Each structure stands twice: as structure tokens, then as C-alpha cells.
Image (cartoon, coloured by chain):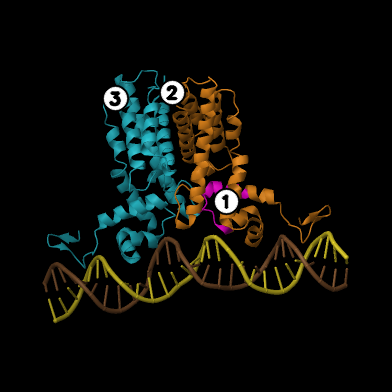
Chain colours: A orange, B cyan, C yellow, D brown
Amino acid sequence: MGRKQGGPIGRPRKFDADEALERAVLTFWEHGYEGASTAQLADAMGISTTSMYAAFGNKEELFCKALERYTEGPSAYLTQALEEPTALGVATAILAGTVRTTTRPAHPHGCLGVQGALAASDSGRGVRDLLVAWRNNSYSCVRERFQRAVDDGDLPPETDPGLLARYVTTLAFGIAVQAASGVGRDELQELADAALRNWPLS
Amino acid sequence: MGRKQGGPIGRPRKFDADEALERAVLTFWEHGYEGASTAQLADAMGISTTSMYAAFGNKEELFCKALERYTEGPSAYLTQALEEPTALGVATAILAGTVRTTTRPAHPHGCLGVQGALAASDSGRGVRDLLVAWRNNSYSCVRERFQRAVDDGDLPPETDPGLLARYVTTLAFGIAVQAASGVGRDELQELADAALRNWPLS
DNA sequence: GCACTTCTGTAGCGATCGCTGCAAAAAGAG
DNA sequence: CTCTTTTTGCAGCGATCGCTACAGAAGTGC
């Protein structure tokens, strides 16, 4: 409701909400949830704080929407990787995607899902728990994919899909920390290659 | 200067500075540098903010001293691990120490060196860079130890010590993130065991 | 006793925090 | 045109931020 073919009712926005959200993603990505102030966010989005609150609710809701956008954008490699035909292909694509996304030039280094709020004050507990769930959900998706690989015979029947998924996600989170520390893309890709040279963790 | 056998000059402290620093370590560990307010720190230390500033300078200096204490305390396993006789022993001890320290009951989960300030606002850039240096220094120590292992014949001559060190530290940082996400000690130890089953990354 | 040094508690500094009230502005509906 | 709806810019809310000035307390050396 509220919309007809003639367009929305009321004064139209002067900014593109999608583009503004993308700027918010970058700001949260670089400075974390609590490290990015509302003034800084609004400035990066090119709008006033009033417009920001009118369009996105409050800071926590804005972060939620930014995380969704991040998941569908820079972090979309995860969903795509799960569709690789083999478990090794899945693991390879996950680590390659992590390396690429966490070391992209002219982008913040690291992973929003990791450095967005790894530790936080009491007021940031909600977002911290949201990111905990985000990371644990990533692990669960990978584990279920590896379980399917075991069921399909792609992985040996004695394989522990949970252990394998923990291995891949631990490497991915570790790569994100290394990227945030300034480690270069090539070195991290070499690491990813070496870590999967022995598969599936025989 | 300033001290003689009769004790220090001036009014003596009513608190134990060492114990107070330990409380500060726990507070920074749990909430991060920017997530821990000076009021919260002073409260956890059992002193007033005035006494805190008189004894430790400012918040950033307090964090520096807390990080030193953390390095010599909960993170001392790293230095000890480097003294293991074999490279595999070093790697095993590092990962076991990481698992133990990041999942200690009644302690904050995770690693202060990782979640202390992975992303930060502009005013926290100093501490963020300090932790970047801390993590990179850990990597360098491990790499040099593995280089020595190559020189001594403990590792095959074609081994890349840097790659191996990157592998171990990446796993350690990843374990710290997993621990901060609530993953249990036993599961992480199983992961550590599995990750070193193929050594040295043949 | 006195002078000197250092620590403690109170009280509050200016700045920033996340967030909002309000009226003018800009659109469609009648 | 008027009425309604939504956005915008401005201004500022109370709360908290890191930090400190100040005076009194508590110890030393003389």
C-alpha cells in the first residue's frame, strides 16, 4: 500500500537509498559498528543524520541492513562456493573468495562479519551477537554442504563434515584477521592453496 | 631515584597496581579497547578514574601496559612454544595454547590481541596499529623459529618457513575468532589436531 | 611540630555520543 | 488552489565520552 503507478506520495528523496547503504557498508567495514559514528556514517552516505534515521531507523537497524547488503554483495562468494560440484571445489572457492574480498584494493581490508563487532561495549551486544550468529550460520552452511558431499560419496564416508567445515571457516576467519593486519593478497592465496593441498585432512 | 629503604615518598597507594592492571586486562579483553570506557575500567579495577590516570597515564597507555601484561600472562604460551625442540612441537604448542587461552572458563573468550581493536574509529587508530604490530610480531617470531628448524635439518630444506608460519598464525587467529563466537574448547582442539596431521604441509 | 611529596575523592570540564522536535519544502490527490 | 504525506535542514536534547583541576588526606624527611 502507499504506492500507485504515479509514484510515491510525499516529498521524494534527494538521495539513492541503495547507494547510501553501500557507503554505510564501507564505513562499518572499515571502522566497525561502534567505531563508526552516526555523524561519520551520514557524512559518508552524503545525507544528514535526520535523513539517515528516517530512511533506516536507528544505527543498529542500519547495521543489520548493511550486513545483509554485505552478505549479498562482497560476501556472496560463500553462497556461490557452496554450489561447486565437489567438496574440494567448495573449500577452494571459499578460501579464494575470502582472500579476494578481504584484500580488495580501495576497499577496507578484512571482513565485516569478523571485525564489525568482535568485542563490544554493553550497548553493542546486540550487534555482536548478530555477527556471532552470522559467523555460526556460515559454518553451518558449509557443514551441511560437506555432509551432503559425504552422503553423495564425494567425501569418504568416515569424514567428519563438522571438523572439515570448522577447518575451512577457521582458515577463512584467520585470513580475515591477517588481511586486517595488512598481509598481502598473494601471500594469503598461497596460504589458502597450501592449506588445501592435503584434502580432506587425511 | 625517589625511593629509599624506608619506602616511597608521599602518600602510599590504597590499591595494588598489579592487581588493578590485571582487572584492566580482563575488561579490555572482553569489551575491546574502545568498548571499554574509562569509568568501566576504573570500576573493574576498584579505583577512581583519578587514581587510574595518576597510575597509568591515559587510556591508551593503560591499554599498552595491559597488552604487555597479557603477553607475559595469558599469551605467554607463545614464547614457551617457540622453545619446543621440533617445529611440529612448536606448532602443536601454539595451537594448543591458543585453544586453551581463548576458551578459558570464567575468562573472556577470544584473544585480546585480535579482538582488542580489529577495527576502530579514528581516535583508536593508535591502538589498532599497535595490535597489528603485535600480531605481525607473533608471525615473525614463528617464522624465524621455523627458519631455524630448516637450518637445523628439522624441517626439509625445501620448506617455506614463512608459509608455514602464516599457516599456524592464521589458524591461531581463526581459532580466536571461533572462540569469540562461542565455539567450545574440545571442538577447537580437535580442529587443531586435524590441522597439524599433515605436517609440514607436504 | 613543619615542609614536601604523592594519592584520593569530588566535581566538573569541553567534546562527542545516538537520536529527535520542529517548521519549511516538495511531491501527489482532490 | 487546499489538504495530506513525506523529506529536508537546523538546532539541540540528555547522556556519556576521555580527562583533569582542586583541595584535603596520608605518608616521608627534617
Give the labeled residue for mark 3: B86
Q: Is residue A59 above or below residue D14?
A: above
> Which chain letter matches label 1?
A
**Residue B186 visible in the displayed image:** yes
Give the labeled residue for mark 2: A201
Asked if labels 3 and 1 touch by Cβ distance under 8 angstroms, the answer is no
Asked if labels 1 and 2 touch by Cβ distance under 8 angstroms, the answer is no
> Which chain letter matches label 2?
A
Marks 1 and 3, how far apart at CA: 46 Å
Tell me, for residue B32, which label it has, or none: none
Mark 1 neighbour class, 10 Å CA radius: few under 14, some 14 to 19, many 20 or more? many
Q: Is residue A153 above or below residue A59?
A: above
Indicate the amino acid at tag 2: Leu
Q: Nearer the viewer, residue D16 or A124?
A: A124
Residue at 34 percent of width and 62 percent of height: B43
> Which chain letter matches label 3?
B
Magenta residues (range): A23-38
Front position among marks 2 and 1: 2
Find residue A179 and report its horizontal and vertical position in percent. Answer: 49, 38
Q: Nearer the viewer, residue A28 or B137?
A: A28
Give the labeled residue for mark 1: A63
Q: Secondary structure at mark 1?
A: helix
Q: Nearer the viewer, residue A28 or B64?
A: A28
